[in-house]
Amino acid sequence: MVTAALEVVKHSSPSPSRATPAPTRRPSQATRRMLKTREAADYLGISTWTLRRLMNEGEIAYMKYRGGAANFDPRDLDAYIERKKVG
């Protein structure tokens, strides 16, 4: 009886050749993380009010979604920092 139970378990486990592969992600999705307003402000070392002012003035690129939330690509924030460097 114990042998039969072991056989069932043995047959019910998936074989490696039939295992479902893990879903692949595009490199851009896997390596890039968008930042929320508070995170972007912290990243730049400014207040959220200042960040919103910069957004309204077109100084910083951002993505806006239907719900109204803004998200920032860290590369755009780095580009802003580079533009503002003096000397």
Image: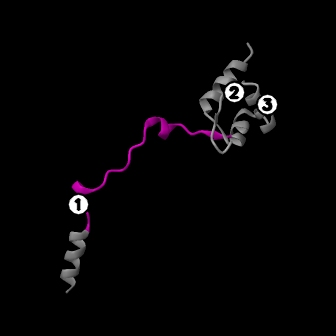
Neighbourhood count class around disc 2 (C-alpha, 10 Å): few under 14, some 14–19, many 20 upward: some
Residue drawn at point x = 56 percent, y = 39 percent: 33
Q: Disc 3 or 2, which lies upstream in sequence?
A: 3
Q: Is residue 54 left or right of residue 63?
A: right
The quarter of the displayed image where residue 39 is located:
top right
Residue 40 lies in the magenta stretch:
no
- x and y percentages locating residue 3 in the rendered image: 18, 81
- x and y percentages locating residue 51 in the rendered image: 76, 33
Q: CA distance from mark 3 to mark 2?
A: 9 Å
Q: Residue furthest bottom?
A: 1
Q: Which residue is mark 3?
A: 53
Q: CA distance from mark 1 to mark 3?
A: 58 Å
Amino acid carrying mark 1 in the image: Ser
- x and y percentages locating residue 72 in the rendered image: 64, 35
Provide the residue span drawn in magenta.
Answer: 13-36
Q: Nearer the viewer, residue 57 or 74?
A: 57
Q: Nearer the viewer, mark 2 or mark 1?
A: 2
Q: Nearer the viewer, residue 20 or 65?
A: 65
- x and y percentages locating residue 41 in the rendered image: 73, 37
Q: CA distance from mark 2 to mark 1?
A: 52 Å
Q: Which mark, by number, is residue 15?
A: 1
